[in-house]
Image (cartoon, grey):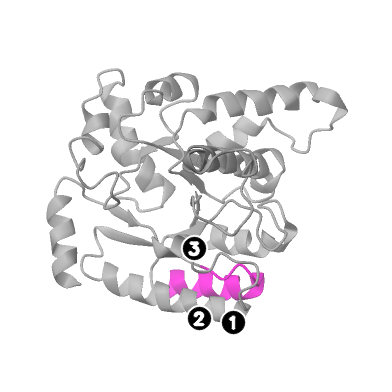
Amino acid sequence: MARVLRRCLRKQVRSRLERLFPTIGLYIIWRDDIDPELSAAICRAYNTWLAEYCDYDRKRLHGVMLIPLQDPALAVAELKYAREKLGLVGIFWRPNKFCDRTFASPDYYPIYEVASDLGVTVCVHEGARSVLPQAGSDRYSEFGRHIACHPLEQMLACLNFCADGVLEKFPKLKVVYLESGCGWVPFWLERMDEHWEHESHGSAKITKEKPSTYFKRQCWVSCEAGEELAPVFVEHVGDDYLMIATDYPHSDAIDKFPDKTVGAISSNDKISSASRTKILWDNPTKAFGLGA
């Protein structure tokens, strides 16, 4: 393992900080029918291993935990342990409906409260393979699954957080939306705000402020390497809410890193130098409270 890690770090010589996300953790606990105690044991084993992995270089490596969401009380306990004892900085959280709950479920409020108090970021990340319900899955081909499920599920998660009152209730909670691209955000914020302003179709608004207000106060989104709409995001939403995600060492990124991942932003002359610095450095460190 140490040899593999050294090889990865050599590849990432230009990358000073890394947030580490699960791979098999995309799926292993994400079933409604897993016994909560078993899920908690899996999360504890993964989080402990991840913390040991990060011990190789704690200044650079920052882990994102799993928590057993089948039982919110167990999830709170693991959140506290993983943050206070293991030093992990975020929660990996699938956006799909889970155990008949969405992000707006009051059952999750104790988790949000503790995450807010401990400075732990909610990291929303979909996965293409799933036994969980996926938005629109009855209407696309297998080819279309990865294309559709990531942005559609993230849009619904953003709706829960920004328009359904979660971020209003928890003003210190930080949320990042990952691996779905950033092009959906300008359109979605505008649409949510328009419905908020006009209470379209007779539906009463839930929040005191426009949904975009909560997004800009508490949220960030990652862009893909070479994403053509990144400059559009900066123009229409702002440069304080965007970060780069390399997806390294997944197969779609391993041969691109770093020149065609980080380099795709650092050399993008359609984005100002000041904005590029925010995307590559300032925004991720702020989102995860690293203060580097």
Q: Residue at x 39, y 26 (%)?
A: 230
Q: Amino acid at mark 3?
A: Tyr
**Marks 1 and 3: CB-CB under 8 Å?**
no
Q: Amino acid at mark 2?
A: Ala
Circle 3 SS class: loop
Q: CA distance from mark 2 to mark 3?
A: 15 Å
Circle 1 SS class: helix
Q: Residue at x 17, y 66 (%)?
A: 4
Q: Is residue 229 above or below residue 90?
A: above
- State the image quarter where residue 154 is shown: top right
Q: Which residue is mark 3?
A: 27
Q: Which residue is mark 1?
A: 37
- Rendering coords of residue 188 (x, y %): 60, 28
Q: Does the magenta stretch mainly form a helix, a strand or a loop? A: helix
**Marks 2 and 1: CB-CB under 8 Å?**
yes
- For the N terminus, the quadrant is bottom left
- Magenta part of the chain: 67-85
Q: CA distance from mark 1 to mark 3?
A: 17 Å
Q: Which circle's residue, 1 or 3, is located before the other in the chain? A: 3
Mark 2: give few (<14), some (14-19) or many (20+) Cα within 10 Å. some
